[in-house]
Structure formats: C-alpha cells, structure tokens
Image (tube, rainbow, N blue to C red):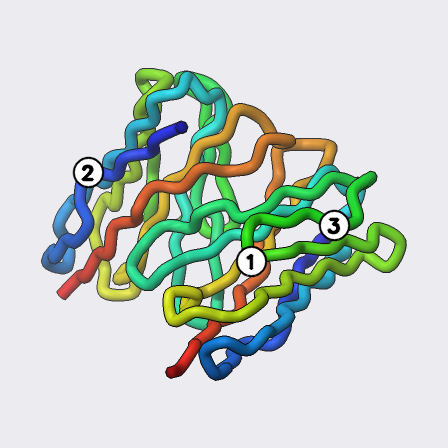
C-alpha cells in the first residue's frame, strides 16, 4: 500500500534554532517528492521538489534531502523565524497513474 | 506563476443546502483536484479530473459531485450539505503527475 508518514506530528522550537522534519514513504514506483508549507488558513505552497537522482535541494533556509534507497526524506530548517510557523506537508507522486500521496503534515511552531 | 483561484475563502451554509465551490486555474493545466483537509487526517482526495468532462472518484467521494465543463474550471458540488462536511476545501491543479501541485488558498466551509 502506498503511504506517506511524517514525523513528528507537531514541534515547538525557539526562534533561531534549527529543526528537521521527517518523511518516510512506501510509494512505488517513485516519481518525485515535494515539501509544501501551509500557513494557517491558506493553501499549501511548494518549497522543494526532488526526483530519484537528487539527494539534496535547498530553498533559502530550507534544505530537503532524499534517500531513495531507504525511502526517506527530511526537511531541515536553519535559523528558524517566527514566520516559519506553519504545517509542512510531504507529497510523493508515483510514476504510474495520476496519483499523489500526502503525509498528514508536521505542525511547526516557532516561539520567540 | 500558475494561479489557482477559489471563489470563496469562507462559507457558512445550512444543512440540506446545495453548495457550489468553484475553482479556476489560469495555466492550461490538464489535471485538477479537490481535497478536503481536516485536523489529524491531512489532505484527502475527493475527486479529480484529467480532462474536460472527465472525472474520477478519489478516496472520499460520497456526498460530493464535480463538474468540469471547461478546462480552466473545476467545481465541487455538495448536493445536500451536512454538518460532517464542515471542513477546509482545497483545489489544486497540475500539468501532469511529475509536475506537482499548485494549490488554491482554500475555502473554509461551515455547515450549520
């Protein structure tokens, strides 16, 4: 069964600290993996997209990694800011069919 | 940038009403999707469409129908709204599976 699991479910960190969010998946055949940021009351916005051959992709203070062998991805946030408070959703797409598989997200709260 | 526009940010409807949620995208994308998002459950696919007049059921289609008469517009219809349909509804579009989603800002529907 194709699944995407994220951890932790929620996280609270101090402003300026780093954090890492995890995404494990069983989607096969794998096409790509995206991390989205969703602010409260808004639609998700894409942060990074990674294909099978990519190990690391950065977008400002956000760095995503992908290990296609272990089917794991992480999103690392450096020097967190209050505006990083949001839900972060991992989405994996399969290369057959027209399917996207969503994790349930990690809720991040950055406190001053 | 692709823009996905949902017609309403907030809606309050009465039980039994027929409800229309509209979604328009401006980049000629083939695929359009409707999701609902509930706390702890993540994003769940209601319906998707890969072409005009084509539709496919997602994971939770019961109580919903859709219409795609034009490529740019995908409507979600609640034939007889019920309180358990209170949720955040997100529309998304994509060029194809490999390209990921662009989401609308969401419609928060409350059924009373």
Q: Which marked residue is nearer to the observer: mark 1 or mark 3? A: 1
Please report the residue visible at 32 percent of the width from the left and 54 percent of the height from the top. Answer: A42
Is residue A53 shown left or right of residue A89?
right
Q: Position of residue A31 (x, y in %)?
A: 73, 38
Q: Chain of mark 2?
A: B
Is residue B48 shown left or right of residue A19?
left
Q: Secondary structure at mark 1?
A: loop
Residue B108 visible, this orientation: yes
Residue under label 3, please give it. Answer: A56
Please report the residue visible at 34 percent of the width from the left and 31 percent of the height from the top. Answer: B3
Query: Disc 1 vs disc 3: Cβ atoms closer than 8 Å?
Result: no
Q: Which marked residue is nearer to the observer: mark 2 or mark 3? A: 3
Q: CA distance from mark 1 to mark 2?
A: 33 Å
Q: Quadrant of the N terminus of chain A?
A: bottom right
Is residue A37 shown left or right of residue A56?
left
Please report the residue visible at 70 percent of the width from the left and 41 percent of the height from the top. Answer: A32
Q: Which marked residue is nearer to the observer: mark 1 or mark 2? A: 1
Q: CA distance from mark 1 to mark 3?
A: 13 Å
Q: Quadrant of the C terminus of chain A?
A: bottom left
Return the mark for residue A61. Answer: 1
Return the mark for residue B7. Answer: 2
Q: Position of residue A99 (x, y in %)?
A: 62, 39
Whether labels 2 and 3 belong to a single chain: the reply is no
């Amino acid at each position: 069964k194709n699944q995407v699991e994220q951890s932790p479910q929620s996280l609270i960190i101090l402003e300026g600290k780093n954090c890492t969010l995890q995404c494990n998946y069983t989607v096969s055949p794998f096409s790509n993996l995206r991390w989205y940021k969703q602010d409260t009351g808004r639609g998700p916005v894409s942060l990074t997209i990674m294909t099978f051959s990519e190990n690391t992709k950065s977008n400002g203070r956000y760095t995503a990694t992908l290990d296609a062998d272990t089917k794991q991805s992480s999103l690392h946030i450096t020097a967190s800011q209050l505006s990083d408070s949001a839900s972060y959703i991992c989405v994996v797409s399969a290369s057959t069919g027209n399917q996207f598989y969503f994790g349930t997200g990690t809720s991040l709260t950055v406190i001053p | 940038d692709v823009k996905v526009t949902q017609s309403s940010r907030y809606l309050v409807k009465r039980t039994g009403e027929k409800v229309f949620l509209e979604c328009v995208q401006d980049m000629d994308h083939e695929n359009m999707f409707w999701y609902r998002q509930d706390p702890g459950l993540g994003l769940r696919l209601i319906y998707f469409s890969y072409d005009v007049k084509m539709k496919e059921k997602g994971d939770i289609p019961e109580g919903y129908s859709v219409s795609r008469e034009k490529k740019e517009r995908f409507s979600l219809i609640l034939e007889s709204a019920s309180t358990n349909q209170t949720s955040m509804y997100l529309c998304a579009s994509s060029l194809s599976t490999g390209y990921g989603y662009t989401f609308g800002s969401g419609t928060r529907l409350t059924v009373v």
